[in-house]
Amino acid sequence: KNEVEQSPQNLTAQEGEFITINCSYSVGISALHWLQQHPGGGIVSLFMLSSGKKKHGRLIATINIQEKHSSLHITASHPRDSAVYICAVTAYTGANSKLTFGKGITLSVRP
Amino acid sequence: EPEVTQTPSHQVTQMGQEVILRCVPISNHLYFYWYRQILGQKVEFLVSFYNNEISEKSEIFDDQFSVERPDGSNFTLKIRSTKLEDSAMYFCASSGGTGPHFGNGTRLTVT
């Protein structure tokens, strides 16, 4: 059973700051997902990665397979980035297998 | 961009009643999932569905729950005889192999 841990639990930042959210997992995976959940509850997929690094706009996700660790970076943070950021993993059984979720990090970006 | 659609957005029901949560996955996706999130807790996997049958289910997904793809577009989750502890946000997701796409969720309140 894979355990997914995220840190820090809550995070408050000032607009413009560089933000890093971390995720670690306990068992080998086929892919790691970063998801965003807004107060209304909907979940949006940000990244799916199995190695290296991906970038989309101001968001950068990295993964270190050997260390079983991933980070999500937000550059030039903005109040609209305030949300819950969730790390989830899929097992070695395949990219279409279920997701195992972390608890999520609540990010608040102050203007 | 294609979306996963869930209805209703909010369902209130009395304990012991049956509810059906509905989802329209993205049309060319083959893998379908139900997840739930109890308030304040992490998202949990319920069941995955592929090729018109359940491919995996969690311990939560007991005889009280069932899933169906009654036609080519809908994917439903039925909860028989609801309990207070079934109150949660229920998310449908579908995948075409590049990661899951989530619906906005149905908030189920059992009174």
Image (cartoon, coloured by chain):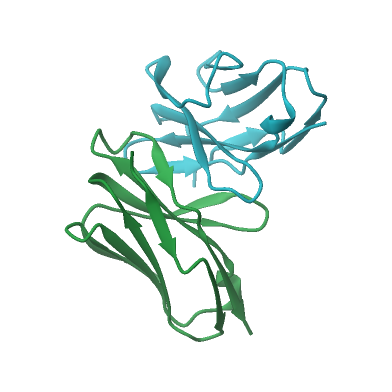
Q: Residue furthest left?
A: A66
Q: Colour of chain A?
A: green
Number of numbered labels in the structure image: 0
Q: Is residue B6 visible?
A: yes
* Rendering quarter of residue B21: top right
x%, y% of residue B104? 61, 44
Query: Closer to the camera, A26 or A14?
Result: A26
Q: Dividing the image into 4 quarters, which one contains the C terminus of chain B?
A: top right
* Rendering quarter of residue B9: top right
* Rendering quarter of residue A52: bottom left
Residue displayed at 50% across by 79% down: A77
- The answer to whether residue A98 is above or below residue A23 is above
- The answer to whether residue A110 is above or below residue B24 is below
Query: Closer to the camera, B7 or A32?
Result: A32
Q: Is residue B80 left or right of residue B101?
A: right
x%, y% of residue A45? 45, 52
x%, y% of residue B2? 50, 42
Residue displayed at 45% across by 52% down: A102
Residue displayed at 41% across by 30% down: B28
Q: Is residue A41 left or right of residue B3?
A: right
- The answer to whether residue B15 is above or below residue B100 is above
Q: Is residue A58 visible?
A: no
x%, y% of residue B88? 66, 38
Residue displayed at 56% across by 85% down: A15
Q: Colour of chain B?
A: cyan
